[in-house]
Amino acid sequence: MRRDCSKYECEQKHSESRIPIWKILLKTYHGGNVLILPEKIRKELDVLLSSGVQPRNVYAVDKSPAVIAIFTRTLSALERSGIHRRGALASVACPAWAKEGVQLEAAHFDLCGNVQGYRHGSVRQELESIARCGIIDNARIAVTVEKGRESSELIEQFDRIGLLTAALKNGLRGRRSTVKVLDSRTYQNGPSPMLWVAFQIKGGIVCRSKSTAK
Ligand SMILES: C[S@@+](CC[C@H](N)C(=O)[O-])C[C@H]1O[C@@H](n2cnc3c(N)ncnc32)[C@H](O)[C@@H]1O
């Protein structure tokens, strides 16, 4: 992904992605745990904190430990001791947190990939693994992907939202969960056309949340 964005791109991402996504995800918020892929900046974290989410309820993950280390430098001492952080794939961090008893109430998987690939670390495999571990069994989640970046024109014949929904349903297989699309939006992030989709996942087996787990 682009490391430096122009003022235009940053503002575009803020007004067309972070702000509307978290407005939807936190509409029914009851003080539970939320997850972000913050990259090395704290803009998304600030949206959460200004919406009333407490640092101890924030889970931050990036597949690069170096990125999490840089993100950590942006945190105050209080935030540092509260916010749970892991440098790992989301599909690795989420099952580990789920094993500790963590349940998420909301999450934004800003995965910056396309929906075409189906290999280790790809968007659809990540979503399947995350859904399988149970951590989003009763959560509002959003998924952001790069739209139109697929190498095959065939993908245009498929419904991207349908492919994301199918990945979540595959992961939830065997449990009595439903996946409902709440909203979606396409926007331009510099040269990249992006798509985000917000989902409500309901009805899985509810585990008690351990919000203090690190
Ligand atoms: C688009 S940036 C996140 C930007 C941030 N959400 C914001 O609003 O400013 C995506 C980040 O996710 C990380 N990433 C991509 N796929 C991932 C995965 N499967 N697991 C964990 N991190 C991932 C990348 O390393 C990158 O730093």
Image: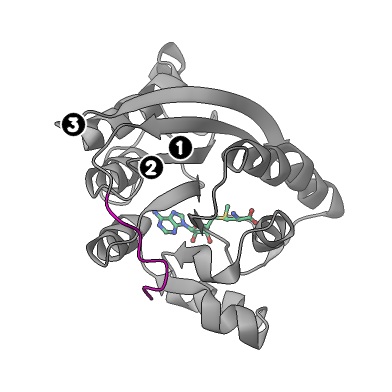
| Spot occupied by residue 28 in the image (x, y as percentages of width and height) | 57, 38
Sequence order check: which comes first, mark 1 or mark 2? Answer: 1
Marks 3 & 2, CB-CB < 8 Å contact: no
What amino acid is at disc 2?
Answer: Val
Figure coloring:
one colour
- Mark 3 or 2: in front is 3
Marker disc for residue 123? 2
**Left or right of 114 on screen, residue 81:** right
The quadrant in which residue 75 appears is bottom right
- Mark 1 or 2: in front is 2
- Mark 1 or 3: in front is 3
Q: Main secondary structure of the magenta part?
A: loop
Q: Residue furthest right?
A: 7
Provide the secondary structure element on which disc 3 rests.
Answer: loop
Query: Does the magenta portion include 209?
Result: yes
Q: Is the CB of mark 2 within 8 Å of ligand 1?
A: yes
**Left or right of 169 on screen, residue 4:** right
Crowdedness near tag 2: few (<14), some (14–19) or many (≥20) residues, C-alpha within 10 Å: many
Quarter of the image that includes the N terminus: bottom right
Crowdedness near tag 3: few (<14), some (14–19) or many (≥20) residues, C-alpha within 10 Å: few
Marker disc for residue 173? 3
Q: Residue furthest left?
A: 174
Sequence order check: which comes first, mark 1 or mark 3? Answer: 1
Figure disc tally: 3
Residue, disc 1: 114
Marks 1 & 2, CB-CB < 8 Å contact: yes
Q: Residues under labels 1 and 2: Cα distance?
A: 7 Å
Stretch of the chain drawn in magenta: 207-214
Q: Nearer the viewer, residue 129 or 33?
A: 33
Provide the secondary structure element on which disc 1 rests.
Answer: loop
